[in-house]
Amino acid sequence: MRLAGKTAIVTGASAGMGEAIAALFAREGANVVAVARRLDRLEQLAAAEKDAPGKILPCRGDIGEPATSRRMVDLAVTSFGRLDILVNNAGIMDDNTAVGDVSDEMIHDLLRVNTCGPLYAMREAIRAFLAQGDEGGNIINIASVGAIHQTAGVAYCASKAALVSATRNTAYMYLEQGIRCNAISPGGVLTDIPLVMPKANDFGFGRTSALLAHSPEMGMPEDIANAAMFLASDESKFINGVVLACDGGWTSF
């Protein structure tokens, strides 16, 4: 098993990519603190994976609140003795609005969840890694092709670009402590986000649809989970500060 004896936290684990990542990690031996706002979905995930070598422990919380990050890290350490891996997957989508029309609320909401949330989680994870005193730790941030490709509105693209920058900064800052920090930038992936995202802004969607029309075949949550597994495992021990595009080649043109 590739993650035997490891403890991981996966945010946004109630559906889609986060659910797939948490399930795969548990099947590969990791104990997983699964974090999301929908506790019932987390409990269903834990029940579905009850026979996996690793245990899934549900943790209800809003990642945009700093207290959630403190609580989930404390839960991992008190329940399993340590923390080895953090996967910042939780995120929300905007409505394709360009900067001239974007609302204060949209800017606040996207940065709160997509940027501030991961920063809070990274801060608490780094503190736990350093307190363990054995050098090492692994952070995987789920960014987006929107960080470099104009596939969404300004709030979403800015929030993910900031996360990419935080990924590289963290990799550099803690290089000597053996802490790795990488990001995955998914392209189009079949999740339930389209069911909950706001109605598209007409002007913004008119602009982004020119690129969306050239998107390759949609990926599956398991495709992103497999990439996260690679970055979480020792197979990627020489990879640090990298943004791994998982987009079917979308950003190659």
Image: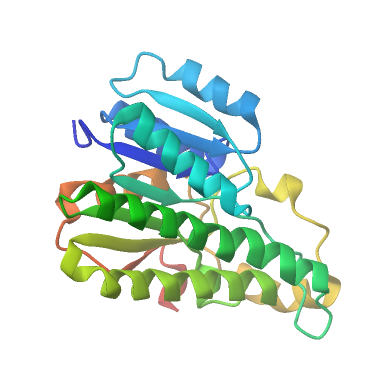
Q: Residue sitting at 68 percent across and 64 percent down?
A: 110
Quadrant occupied by the C terminus: bottom left
Judge left or right: residue 19 versus residue 84. right
Q: Residue sitting at 51 percent across and 24 percent down?
A: 45
Residue 34 visible? The answer is yes
| Residue 252 pos. (x, y %) | 40, 75
Residue 24 visible? The answer is no
In the picture shown, does residue 5 fall above or below 16?
above
Q: Residue sitting at 50 percent across and 78 percent down?
A: 148
| Residue 241 pos. (x, y %) | 29, 70
Q: Which of 139 and 158 lies nearest the eye of the viewer?
A: 139
| Residue 13 pos. (x, y %) | 52, 38
Tell me which colouring the rendered structure shows: rainbow
Q: Which of 36 and 147 lies nearest the eye of the viewer?
A: 36
Judge left or right: residue 41 versus residue 202. left
Displayed quadrant of residue 14: top right
Q: Which of 17 and 135 lies nearest the eye of the viewer?
A: 135
In the picture shown, does residue 244 fall above or below 13?
below
| Residue 23 pos. (x, y %) | 41, 31
Judge left or right: residue 118 versus residue 173. right
